[in-house]
Image (cartoon, rainbow, N blue to C red):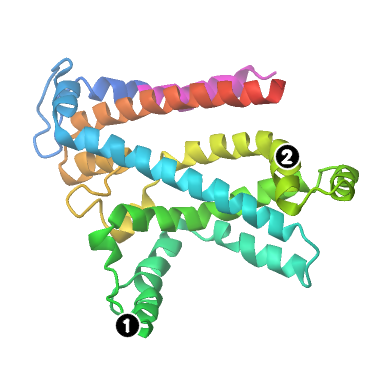
Amino acid sequence: MLSPTVIVLLIWMIVPLVLTLWFSFQRYNLLRPAGGFVGFDNYAYLLEGHDLWRSIWNTVLLVGGVLIATITFGTLSAVLLNQPLIGRGILRLLYIAPFFVMPTVGALIWKNLLLNPVTGLFAWFAHLLRVTPIDWFSNVPLLAIGIIVAWQWIPFATLILLTALQSLDQDQMEAAHMDGAGPIARFRYIMLPHLARPISIVVMIETIFLLSVFAEILVTTSGGPGIATTNLPFLVYKTALLRYDIGGASAGGIIAVVLANIVAFFLVRSVATSMER
């Protein structure tokens, strides 16, 4: 009974992948369609160039930095929102709201209303403190992109970790409190071990999505200045739609798929290991 669905899904996944693999061995440019088989020339051109390695490094920095920020602030936020507070339900709703904002809209808000060096909110605070405002997208563009992406994903981490905290045995927390354990000790020895599995799941899910960050880069820096904020997805986009090099873009796509599968393999293994403990 499941065979038709499985066949459709396989065709849906395999056909684009096979076509991408086929184009990666072709010299195919939209401005000069006449090409032919070139073997591994497209891969060699990418691997010998500076853009690919810089985009891989930018991807690693962006994913790693956002993961550290989301796990750190998500854990602290979950602990705070788990405390008895007035209006806790409304506060939780407002805190999680940024996750439902479209990436393009969120990036435009940060670019024009918050990080703008002339009219942005951060520039206004800088003028109040009598310091020079930072031109975020010129001086620290990758950090600016990371802030925007982290702002969108911290609520997701908070939601998952807050749900996990609500399943924590309160009798254990009360017993530790009666034994003289302070808030830091209870957080370190009780809460963090309890959150180990949810954190590993958050890391796996976020990594999968963070490897494909694109909209925030497109509407803020367009991969610049130069290639300072160009990650792998944006490199493929530039190669295909700005340089019209379908063969090179397909080779970049295949390299991105291989790297993503390597990362996914180790993430799944780490999550499976944490689940067995």
Q: What residue type is labelled 2?
A: Tyr
Residue farthest to the front, as pictured? 180
Q: What stretch is highlighted in magenta?
A: 1-17
User: What percent of the width, then of the height, locates residue 185?
Assistant: 73, 46
Asked if 202 appears above or below 40 in the picture, the reply is: below
Which disc is residue 241 wearing?
A: none
Of residues 31 and 91, the one drawn nearer to the viewer in this rendering: 91
Dots 2 and 1: beta carbons under 8 Å? no
Q: Is residue 11 magenta?
A: yes
User: What percent of the width, then of the height, locates residue 101?
Assistant: 52, 61
Q: Main structural element of the magenta stretch: helix, strand or loop? A: helix
Q: Which residue bears the numbered disc 1?
A: 130
CA distance for labels 2 and 1? 44 Å
- Tell me the quadrant of the picture where the N terminus can be found: top right
Q: Which residue bears the numbered disc 2?
A: 189
Asked if 132 appears above or below 197 in the picture, the reply is: below
Q: Is residue 228 magenta?
A: no
Asked if 110 appears above or below 150 in the picture, the reply is: below
User: What percent of the width, then of the height, locates residue 33?
Assistant: 12, 32
Asked if 247 appears above or below 154 in the picture, the reply is: above
Of residues 15 and 237, the one drawn nearer to the viewer in this rendering: 237
Q: In this view, does 46 lie to the left or right of 89?
A: left
SS under mark 2: helix
Mark 2 surroundings: few (<14), some (14-19) or many (≥20) residues within 10 A: few
Q: Which amino acid does label 1 sit on?
A: Arg
Q: Is residue 35 left or right of residue 69?
A: left
What count of labels does the image hold? 2
Q: Which residue is drawn at 36% across and 42% down?
A: 61
SS under mark 1: loop
Question: Sequence-wise, which precedes: disc 2 or disc 1?
Answer: 1
Quadrant of residue 80 within the rendered picture: bottom right
- Tell me the quadrant of the picture where the C terminus can be found: top right
